[in-house]
């Protein structure tokens, strides 16, 4: 938001001039800015020593229980990205995240953390280096079910070395940001799944991390709740936090992430913004066809005549990916007729990230 | 290693307190943990208090059988009644044993037929016990034995009284006879002396008699000479008389023939005639004298012969006396020798009597009770505990601490360890030391709170004696808490799931319990196992608590146990750190292998579809 960016700049320049924080805060509150937002920016500026430059994953290989999970994986995460790591189940998304935060020691390779104005250092050799700047939310909410929302956040604030008023203020900020103010005194176990996830993320950001790692934040959530979580993630990202999200919900990733990394067969296969990826891989259109008989053998045979067309059957529907959508659309009624069938549903769209992903993972790997 | 400054230290302490507070909230808000932490010990102490706050074996039933009850068997049974045992009498040994098997009674006492004390075969009491109820069997054996022993002691005392009385009488008799022996000794001595004197006198007595030396021959010779002389004199007188008569006749004839006057002649004649008459008388007298002399000589000879005979007889007698004396001397010598021997015997007897008296005198213990039971088996409690609870109390404390620490601590650790929250915790700048310390402190503090509640309840409601040694009890209890908390932490860090950890805790605590003296005395174990059991941390801690709470012992008497538990704490600390580090290394890997791949559940898929449809519409 330009206004918030202006605010951040104003705070930065005013503090640089030597204006006391308290005075500036009061001044800005009078001007109508919420105190928690002001505080957030002040703290962000105060913690420039923890400002992330980038994280570089270099040839990380990891085997768990004899199974190769990551294979010479490379990835660079520059500051400011909202990076969605997408991949199938078991592709190694979680393993990659745990390696980034230094939980897992790779069999080979390294994770290099570079903070602004500081020398790069290995997270593997110095896992404590990343701790002050990272927030982490694993797949299952990492919260204490018996503690209230407030108590949970306060606890993690304390573990991050915050004390006294700081804890109260940061807790308040995190609760407001996660929009769980009404539930602050509710035990976590009584929250809905979405609220628990929000609390989980609130706990992860209580230290106002430069890097937030989220593992499947919307797993098991309904689309509305998932959207709610994505809104929260976007909001956190907008406050300047670099976010890495592992997800298998490609549509959500496409919608909300600034950057996407596709993990396939234990390797990062592609990285880029969703638009970049679509420009490279999504020249095709997707036609979704559903017929009365739902018998697609003959139709598939006839459609194979068109070059550059791939056909898959999914959920009793025929998914036709083609570079010649107009031709197919014009021939389709005839083909259906030939098959003694009739169309019940027909939908045509340009290829989404999902189709790109599906195409990519269906391709055999080049050796 | 750089020591933290004041600010850092305050920060660390604050960090620990925050985690401890969180842990406590988490635990207390979990119903099962709350039950375990608060209600568990309270219930335990409550029930233990109610159950054992007495000194009587209320519900122990004893069966008895005797072929013929007598006063003695009845007295034994009365003794059992005194101790509030319930007794049932059975009509056969088999019935009594069957009653144990049926659970009707706990023990059966069978008295020997015609039960009498101190008579072999008649003084036997047989116990039948159900050893499948081990501890009850031990308790019953102990209590019944005590009662029987008391009665036995009374009987034994009576028997010993008789022996003592006999001994006393013997002593008196010895004392009395000792005087007689002394008298006998002196009499014997006197007799010996007298025999000696008599012997000497006898030996001095000259019984030699030589009749020749008596001068009887000389006497006879002198008599013969006198007789001879007398006869010669008589003979000479007679001859002289004869001659005088002749001369007178010649004179008269001459005178007559002389010319002297007739008258003169006559006168002379007459005169001469008178003279002749006188001479004749003299002659007669001389003859008489001679006869008398002969007669006297004969008489003398007769007397002399009689004397000689008598002397000879006397000599014979004297010789016989001499022989008798000799014999007497010999016999006296023999008697003296015998007396000497008798004296030696008497002296020996006297010595023996003295020794007997001395020996009897050396029996200082004359109290029959003490002799009947020389080692005073009066069981006096070292400490004056008011009820079983007081004896049981140290064990209860150790038991509560052990079980709670071994169950609570792993639960506390695994509640967090198996939750993704652990990952977030480990990603904060909070150090492992603070996490470790906090976990330890949470458990230790909760246990301390429990302990204080138990102590309070026990003191207020069950008159426990804890207050007397409160400080040292608290120190030992804290050491116990530290050790078992660390042991619980090791389990929590070693085992990955609550189920296995609880199983391990239960196994460990049961092991500690089995190899302790709670169920059976350690002394009943095999030597090496018993030795090992003495080093069982539960045994060490309960022994320490027993010494302080029940015996009020000073630290000097149990420093070894104290040192042992301190060493255990140090070892457990090392192992805890090792287990923690090991867990820390593997936690993410284990978490990753455990988490379900992020797939949409069927339910969420349906929900998602429905909502998508709604949105489309």
Image (tube, coloured by chain):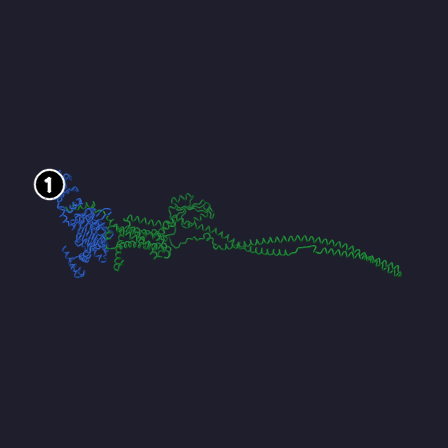
Question: Residue A187: horizontal and vertical position, in percent?
Answer: 23, 52
Residue B92 or A306: which is nearer the viewer?
A: A306
The color chain A is rendered in: blue
> Which chain does the numbered disc 1 sit on?
A
Residue B92 drawn at (x, y percent): 43, 43
Instruction: Check disc 1 and report the residue beneath it.
Output: A331
Q: Is residue A222 visible?
A: no
Q: What letter labels the chain drawn in green?
A: B
The answer to which quarter of the image holds residue A21 is bottom left
* Quarter of the picture holding the N terminus of chain B: bottom left
Q: Is residue A283 visible?
A: yes
Q: Picture quarter containing residue A162?
A: bottom left
Residue extending farthest front = A367
Viewer-side residue, B434 vs A199:
B434
Left or right of B156: which side holds B474?
left
Front position in the image: A122 or B172:
A122
In the foreground, A361 or A312 = A361
Please, what secondary structure does the residue beneath circle 1 have?
helix
């Amino acid at each position: 938001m330009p206004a918030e960016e202006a605010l951040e700049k104003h705070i930065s320049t005013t503090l640089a001039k030597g204006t006391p924080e308290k005075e500036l805060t009061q001044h800005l509150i009078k001007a109508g800015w919420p105190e928690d937002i002001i505080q957030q920016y002040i703290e962000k500026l105060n913690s420039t020593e923890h400002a992330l430059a980038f994280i570089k994953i270099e040839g990380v290989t990891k085997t768990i229980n004899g199974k190769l999970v990551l294979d010479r994986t490379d990835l660079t995460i520059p500051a400011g990205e909202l990076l969605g790591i997408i991949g199938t189940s078991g592709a190694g998304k979680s393993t990659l995240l745990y390696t980034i935060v230094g939980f897992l020691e790779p069999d080979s390779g390294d994770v290099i953390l570079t903070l602004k104005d500081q020398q790069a250092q290995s997270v593997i050799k110095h896992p404590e280096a990343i701790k002050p700047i990272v927030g982490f939310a694993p797949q299952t909410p990492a919260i204490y079910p018996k503690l209230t929302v407030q108590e949970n956040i306060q606890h993690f604030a304390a573990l991050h070395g915050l004390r006294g008023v700081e804890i109260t203020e940061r807790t308040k900020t995190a609760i407001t940001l996660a929009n769980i103010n009404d539930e602050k005194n509710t035990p976590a176990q009584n929250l809905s799944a979405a609220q628990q996830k929000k609390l989980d993320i609130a706990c992860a950001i209580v230290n106002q991390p430069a890097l937030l790692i989220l593992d499947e934040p919307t797993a098991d959530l309904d689309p509305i709740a998932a959207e709610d979580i994505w809104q929260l993630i976007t909001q956190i990202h907008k406050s300047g936090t670099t976010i890495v999200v592992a997800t298998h919900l490609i549509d959500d990733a496409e919608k909300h992430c600034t950057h996407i990394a596709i993990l396939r067969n234990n390797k990062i296969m592609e990285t880029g913004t969703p638009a970049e990826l679509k420009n490279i891989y999504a020249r095709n259109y997707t036609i979704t066809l559903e017929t009365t008989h739902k018998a697609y053998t003959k139709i598939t045979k006839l459609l194979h005549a068109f070059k550059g067309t791939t056909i898959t059957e999914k959920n009793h529907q025929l998914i036709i990916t083609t570079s010649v959508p107009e031709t197919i659309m014009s021939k389709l009624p005839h083909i259906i007729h030939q098959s003694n069938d009739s169309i019940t549903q027909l939908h045509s769209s340009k290829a989404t990230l999902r189709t790109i992903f599906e195409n990519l993972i269906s391709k055999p790997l080049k050796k | 290693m750089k020591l933290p400054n004041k600010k850092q230290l305050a920060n660390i302490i604050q960090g620990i307190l925050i985690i401890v507070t969180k842990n406590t909230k988490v635990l207390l808000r979990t119903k099962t943990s709350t039950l375990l932490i608060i209600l568990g010990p309270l219930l335990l102490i409550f029930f233990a208090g109610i159950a054992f706050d007495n000194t009587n074996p209320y519900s122990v039933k004893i069966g008895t059988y005797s072929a013929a009850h007598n006063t003695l068997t009845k007295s034994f049974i009365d003794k059992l009644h005194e101790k509030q045992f319930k007794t049932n009498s059975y009509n056969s040994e088999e019935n009594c044993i069957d009653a144990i098997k049926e659970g009707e009674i706990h023990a059966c006492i069978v008295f020997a037929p015609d039960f009498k004390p101190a008579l072999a075969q008649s003084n036997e009491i047989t116990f039948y016990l159900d050893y499948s109820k081990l501890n009850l069997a031990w308790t019953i054996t102990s209590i019944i034995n005590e009662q029987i022993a008391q009665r036995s002691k009374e009987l034994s005392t009576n028997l010993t009284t008789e022996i003592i009385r006999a001994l006393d009488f013997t002593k008196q008799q010895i004392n009395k006879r000792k005087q007689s022996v002394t008298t006998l000794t002196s009499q014997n001595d006197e007799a010996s002396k007298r025999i000696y004197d008599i012997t000497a006198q006898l030996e001095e007595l000259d019984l030699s008699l030589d009749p020749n030396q008596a001068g009887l021959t000389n006497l006879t010779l002198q008599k013969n000479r006198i007789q001879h002389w007398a006869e010669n004199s008589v003979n000479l007188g007679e001859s002289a008389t004869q001659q005088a008569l002749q001369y007178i006749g010649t004179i008269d004839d001459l005178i007559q023939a002389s010319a002297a006057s007739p008258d003169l002649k006559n006168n002379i004649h007459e005169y001469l005639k008178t003279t002749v008459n006188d001479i004749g008388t003299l002659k007669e007298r001389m003859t008489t004298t001679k006869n008398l002399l002969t007669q006297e000589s004969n008489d003398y000879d007769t007397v002399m012969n009689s004397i000689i005979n008598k002397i000879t007889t006397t000599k014979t007698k004297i010789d016989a006396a001499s022989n008798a004396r000799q014999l007497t001397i010999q016999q006296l010598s023999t008697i003296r020798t015998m007396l000497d021997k008798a004296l030696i015997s008497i002296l020996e007897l006297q010595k023996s009597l003295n020794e007997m008296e001395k020996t009897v005198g050396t029996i200082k213990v004359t109290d029959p009770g003490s002799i009947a039971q020389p080692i005073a088996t009066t069981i006096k409690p070292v400490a004056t505990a008011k009820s079983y609870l007081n004896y049981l109390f140290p064990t209860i404390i150790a038991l509560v601490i052990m079980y709670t620490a071994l169950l609570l601590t792993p639960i506390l650790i695994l509640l967090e360890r198996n939750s993704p929250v652990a990952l977030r915790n480990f990603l904060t700048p909070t150090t492992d030391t603070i996490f470790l310390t906090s976990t330890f402190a949470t458990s230790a503090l909760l246990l301390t709170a429990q302990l204080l509640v138990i102590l309070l309840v026990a003191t207020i409601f069950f008159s426990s004696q804890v207050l007397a040694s409160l400080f040292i009890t608290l120190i030992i209890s804290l050491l116990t808490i530290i050790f078992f908390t660390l042991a619980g932490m090791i389990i929590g860090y070693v085992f990955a799931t609550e189920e296995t950890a609880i199983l391990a805790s239960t196994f460990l605590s049961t092991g500690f319990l089995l190899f302790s003296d709670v169920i059976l005395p350690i002394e009943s174990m095999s030597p090496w196992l018993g030795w090992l059991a003495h080093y069982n941390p539960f045994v060490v801690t309960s022994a320490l608590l027993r010494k302080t709470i029940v015996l009020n012992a000073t630290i000097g008497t149990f420093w070894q146990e104290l040192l042992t538990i301190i060493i255990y704490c140090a070892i457990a600390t090392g192992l805890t750190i090792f287990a923690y580090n090991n867990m820390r290394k593997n936690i993410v890997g284990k978490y990753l292998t455990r988490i379900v791949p992020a797939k949409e559940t069927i339910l969420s898929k349906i929900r998602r579809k429905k909502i998508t449809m709604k949105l489309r519409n």
